Image (spheres, helix red, strand yellow):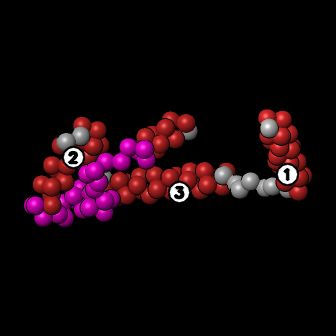
Amino acid sequence: MDEHNDILKDILDNPHDSYIPADKLMAYLEGRLGESERRAIEEILSGDGMESDALDGLQKVATTETRQIEDRLNRHLHKTLKTRNSRSKPVNMNIVTLVAIAILLGLILVTYFIIYKAIR
């Protein structure tokens, strides 16, 4: 699971300028794009060895299986993000914490005035 989180973090931290939407990539794999769109996608993919390798792998897999893989990855991503968001809870400051902060601020002010009067 940590490996998946590392990969996801790497993808999110390093966005590419040459983004290809999933629907356009699927249309490319199914051969539904025009010549100019196909060449544009191939040009983007030729610039990055990892993306080119991924496309080669996708072309070897049936389109229906590719869609199933995409759905599974999207579900996993949403589940991971939902879990991550549920872990970050707001700070619950109760009355004891607020009183402690007020006392500390009071002590700091008193110390300041004592030092200030000692200097004069």
Q: Is residue 2 visible?
A: yes
Against 95, is 54 above or below?
above
Q: Name the residue at 43% across, 47% down.
A: 12
Residue 30, how many percent across, how many down?
23, 59
**Quadrant, the N terminus:** top right
Against 114, is 44 above or below?
below
Report helix, strand or loop for mark 1. Answer: helix
Residue 91, how many percent across, how many down?
74, 53
For disc 2, the marked residue is 45
For disc 1, the marked residue is 102
Left or right of 101 on screen, residue 2: left
Q: Which amino acid is tagged 1?
A: Ala
Q: Quadrant of residue 40?
A: bottom left
* Residue segment shown in magenta: 11-36
Q: Name the residue at 36% across, 48% down.
A: 15
Residue 109, how many percent across, how many down?
82, 46
Left or right of 31 on screen, residue 117: right
For disc 3, the marked residue is 78
Q: Is residue 28 magenta?
A: yes
Report helix, strand or loop for mark 3. Answer: helix
Q: Name the residue at 55% across, 53% down.
A: 81
Q: Quadrant of residue 49?
A: top left
Q: Which amino acid is tagged 3?
A: His
